[in-house]
Image (tube, rainbow, N blue to C red):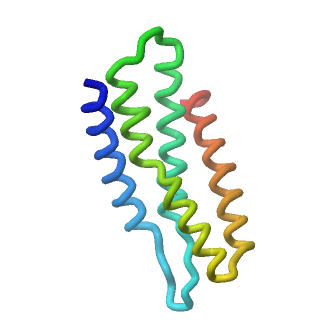
């Protein structure tokens, strides 16, 4: 039964990721690209993960809600493969410094969002 909850959460998370990425990722006429949509959805996923993590951490059994939200929804929203692909694109265009900024921004804001979700929300 846990597979059903993972499937549902993953589907919802993937749809949210698709909508946010398409809305915010952009390329301008000079071919400058900044994957802000991917950054937003990864930060949001970390925030949601942190927020719900505190509800599941002390449980002795894993509930279907855990599979729906933590494994499914957050797993479907987070976009590591897209993140790596976009990093590769920066490298291929000779924009290594922008790629490094993107990596650092993603890691720092993702960790901060996870912390805020656990501690502040």
Give the quarter of the figure containing the N terminus: top left
Quadrant of res 71: top left
- Between residues 24 and 60, which one lies in front from this camera angle? 60
- Between residues 30 and 82, which one lies in front from this camera angle? 82
Looking at the picture, how far across and down is residue 99, in whole percent?
67, 69
Q: Is residue 27 above or below residue 36?
A: below
Quadrant of res 92: bottom right
Taking 58 as reference, is 20 left or right?
left
Q: Is residue 94 above or below residue 62?
A: below
Taking 22 as reference, is 105 left or right?
right
Please give the name of the residue rendered at 31% of the width and 53% of the height, measured from the top-left corner.
15
Looking at the picture, how far across and down is residue 81, in whole percent?
50, 57
Please give the name of the residue rendered at 56% of the width and 72% of the height, measured from the top-left corner.
34
Taking 104 as reference, is 64 left or right?
left
Q: Outermost residue, bottom direction?
A: 30
Q: Outermost residue, top direction?
A: 60
- Between residues 20 and 92, which one lies in front from this camera angle? 92
Please give the name of the residue rendered at 40% of the width and 59% of the height, measured from the top-left corner.
20
Looking at the picture, how far across and down is residue 43, in whole percent?
54, 49
Looking at the picture, how far across and down is residue 18, in whole percent?
35, 59
Q: Outermost residue, right direction?
A: 97
Query: How many tags in the picture?
Result: 0
């Amino acid at each position: 039964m846990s597979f059903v909850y993972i499937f549902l959460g993953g589907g919802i998370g993937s749809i949210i990721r698709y909508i946010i990425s398409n809305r915010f990722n952009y390329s301008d006429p000079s071919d400058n690209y900044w994957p802000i949509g991917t950054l937003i959805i990864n930060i949001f996923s970390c925030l949601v993960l942190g927020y719900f993590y505190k509800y599941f951490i002390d449980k002795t059994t894993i509930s279907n809600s855990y599979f729906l939200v933590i494994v499914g929804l957050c797993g479907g929203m987070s976009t590591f493969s897209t993140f790596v692909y976009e990093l590769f694109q920066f490298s291929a265009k000779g924009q290594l410094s922008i790629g490094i900024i993107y990596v650092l921004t993603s890691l720092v804001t993702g960790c901060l969002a996870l912390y805020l979700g656990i501690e502040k929300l």
